[in-house]
Amino acid sequence: MPTRTARTAWNGDLQNGAGQVELTSSGRGTFDVSFPKRSAENADGTTSPEELIAAAHSACYAMQLSALIAEAGGTPQSLDVGADVSLGPDPAGGFRLTGITLKVRGEVDGLDADGFMKAAQDAKASCPVSKALTGVEISLDAALES
């Protein structure tokens, strides 16, 4: 299996410094990062590790859910998956990820709401990014749309 690569160039200290994260494997872009904007409500045009984790988790979850829906005999027509990743203080000092909420709305042929919910729960537990983030509470808001 492949290995994917990203890199960050950082200059300065935490509070006054800034950097750029580059999606090296895909070559799809370089994005500004800074701690003050990472910890602010408004990202003001910068990304953060939490946003990148949210992107990775929503993509991984969508792939895993589509596979599990098919295994259960359904056909996914569309899946709209969002991931919210929260940063907060760590009681041990510093910061930590305080929670992740996955939200999925799906249009699926061949599964009822219970079958969709089972696949959604199983995907939350079995997608590789969820497995990597076992130290963070992950909640799920899933619904089948007609």
Image (spheres, rainbow, N blue to C red):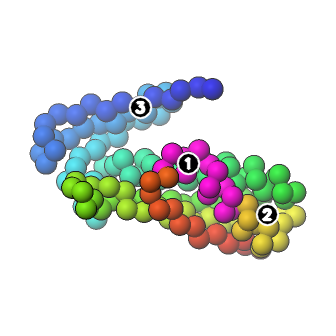
Q: Residues within 10 Å of mark 1 (few under 14, many from 20)?
A: few
Residue 17 image point, x, y percent: 15, 41
Tell me which residue sits at (34%, 36%) in the image. Answer: 21
Q: Residues within 10 Å of mark 3 (few under 14, many from 20)?
A: few
Answer yes or no: is residue 43 visible. no
Queried whether the magenta region covers residue 126, the answer comes back as yes
Q: How many marks?
A: 3
Residue 73 image point, x, y percent: 87, 57
How far apart are the alpha carbons under marks 3 and 2? Answer: 34 Å
Q: Residue 92 or 3: which is nearer the viewer?
A: 92
Direction from residue 1 to residue 100 in the image, left or right: left
From the image, which quarter does the N terminus lie in? top right
Q: Residue 97 or 80: which is nearer the viewer?
A: 97
Q: Earlier in the sequence, mark 3 or mark 2?
A: 3
- Badge 3 marks a residue whose secondary structure is loop
Q: Amino acid at mark 1?
A: Lys
Queried whether the magenta region covers residue 138, the answer comes back as no
Is the residue 117 above or below the residue 58 in the image? Answer: below
- 3 and 2 marks in contact (CB < 8 Å): no
Tell me which residue sits at (20%, 41%) in the image. Answer: 18
Q: Amino acid at mark 3?
A: Ala
From the image, which quarter does the C terminus lie in? bottom right
Q: Which mark is residue 108?
A: 2
Residue that badge 1 annotates = 131
Tell me which residue sits at (64%, 69%) in the image. Answer: 142
Direction from residue 104 to residue 73 in the image, left or right: right
Q: Earlier in the sequence, mark 1 or mark 3?
A: 3
- Badge 1 marks a residue whose secondary structure is helix
The residue stretch that appears in magenta: 120-133
Residue that badge 3 annotates = 6
- Badge 2 marks a residue whose secondary structure is strand
Is the residue 68 above or below the residue 100 in the image? Answer: above
